[in-house]
Amino acid sequence: MAATDRKSAQQNLTTAYQFAAVAAQRHRDAAAIFQRSNRWAVNAVAASWIVLVWFAWFSLRALVPIWAPAAATGLLVLLAVLVARWRTHGA
């Protein structure tokens, strides 16, 4: 009787370890998806700001020199890279 109880307990423990391993893998997968979606979100926001800067320049090109939107684009790209790097190393 004790042997069957021990065998049943061992099976339960093995099942619990398998569930824990699956849960850990799903957690890693979810974390990777979350980081990837954060990178896409940062890039999408930066791209939309860059488009906004250039459309503003097209509407005001008689008053604003061409280097102004180019400099703003460079700053926005730099900011997006820094935020993405900070999120990657900070998470």
Image (cartoon, grey):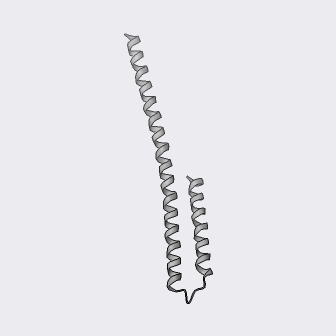
14 and 57: which is toward the camera = 57
Residue located farthest toward the left when viewing the structure as drawn: 1
Residue drawn 60% across and 80% down?
Answer: 68
Vertical relation: 59 (above or below) 90: below
The image shows residue 10 at horizontal and vertical percentages of 43, 20
Find the residue positioned furthest to the top. 1
| Left or right placement of residue 6 versus residue 49 in this view | left
Q: Is residue 41 left or right of residue 67?
A: left
For residue 8, what is the image quadrant? top left
Q: Nearer the viewer, residue 31 or 75?
A: 75
Vertically, is 84 above or below 50? above
Name above or below for residue 17 compared with residue 1: below
Tell me what residue is drawn at x 61 percent, y 71 percent: 74
Give above or below for 20 relative to 61. above
At 51% across and 62% down in the image, what residue appears? Answer: 42
Q: Residue at x 58, y 86 (%)?
A: 64
19 and 2: which is toward the camera = 19
In what quadrant of the picture does the N terminus appear? top left
Q: Position of residue 17 (x, y in %)?
A: 46, 29
**Numbered-mark total:** 0
Task: Report the side of 44 relative to 86 (left or right).
Answer: left
Q: Quadrant of residue 14?
A: top left
- Measured from the top left, where is residue 87 in percent x and y? 56, 57
